[in-house]
Amino acid sequence: MQTFQTYSFQNKRAIVRVDFNVPLDKNTGAVSDDKRIRAALPTLKHILENGGSIVLLSHFGRPKNGPEAVFSLEQICAKVSEVLGTNVDFADDCISEAAFSKSAALQPGQVLLLENVRFYKEETAGDLEFAKKLAQHGDCYVNDAFGAAHRAHASTTQIASFFPNDKMMGLLMEGELANARKVLHEAKRPFTAIVGGAKVSDKVLIVQNLLNLADHIIIGGGMAYTFFKALGGEIGASLCEEERLETCKEILATAKEKGVQIHLPTDAIIADRFAADAHTQTAPSGAISGAWMGLDIGPEAIKDFSAVLENSQTILWNGPMGVFEMPAFEQGTKAVALAVAAATKNGAFSLIGGGDSAAAVQKFGLQDQVSYVSTGGGALLEYFEGKVLPGVQAIEA
């Protein structure tokens, strides 16, 4: 396997798979968060500064029926040019003669962005012939799209097979894996995992795998109420997956066997409806009545969780503590973010697991006060579930 830092890009056209699936402002159509574009900057600048040119591949949204203007990468081309500090040309196709002409004409220092690879159903099908065509755009392949590393798609996996001696991970992908492996294999004790979000079913595999790794597992968000129901509590109209009650009991039993401490929120901020302006009050998480529902962790839970985090040396955070998008229910997530930042300041290593957790630390201005914020929610989740990531395997094979 080639390493990115030692590879010679001089006069080479590098096909770089990036994850530029960025959000757009509904009113202006402009990129509203360029974090993913900026995350790829070190990789792209290294190639250009070392005499190479770049052909960018990315998906954008989930188009169902071929090309649609709303999913065109042309909408972000100006932002990519601005962030990169150089003009980025655009090809309105991936495998047309016009697209191949543009990539063939690239000179060192130039950049071409191809149209959304998901405009072809062959992309998500992992079609080898489609990957072969994409491979014709360059001399080497760099996968820097950690956010799509769990997808066995043509541009993330199959294309690598056409560059047996010229395939490598970019700096972002290398960094993501190094930080994930630090938590998985080199965690300093105590190791605390914070798992939140709406559903137990979304996080059951990661929790089960963490039972073999962590000393403490903090559980928050909507998924906590399924645990309280499993323990015989009353949860009112809170989110609950009845079919996962036995799973919760098994997790608690296994944790006890292995000496892992599971921390559930003792109290909750409850609301009479799911709305930003709902009436709210505080109640024990296992004693919620009637139509009331838990939408955030309460002050006692905040105190308990913060104490655990304060004494942790390694922290993994995946999932919010409540509906933090609404100001009335953001305090739990904010308090946990502050506790993670405080622990980091005191020497702990903290990995924020993409998705909502990354959005939360950004919302509260704490992204620079934690050790690492992942760009790949789903990919990181699957990595910690113990799964092989196809995008990584294709490079390492």
Image (cartoon, helix red, strand yellow):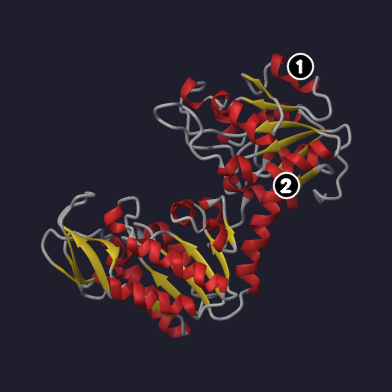
| Label 1 Cα crowd, 10 Å radius (few <14 / some 14-19 / many 20+) | few
Q: Check disc 1 and give the amino acid type.
A: Ser
Res 101 label: 1
Tell whether 235 sits left or right of 172. left
Q: Is residue 235 above or below residue 255?
A: above
Residue located at (51% from left, 40% from top):
33
Tell me which numbered mark, 1 or 2, is placed earlier along the sequence: 1
Dot 2 amino acid type: Gly
Give the residue furthest to the top: 98
Residue 180: image location, x then y, percent: 62, 62
Q: Which of 34 and 144 is in front in this view?
A: 34
Q: Which residue is drawn at 35% across and 76% down?
A: 303
Q: In this view, does 264 lie to the left or right of 46?
A: left
Horizontal side of 159 relative to 125 (left or right) equals right
Whether residue 264 is visible, yes or no, is no
Residue furthest left as drawn:
290
Q: Which numbered tag is attached to residue 170?
A: 2
User: Quick check: 28 above or below 297?
Assistant: above
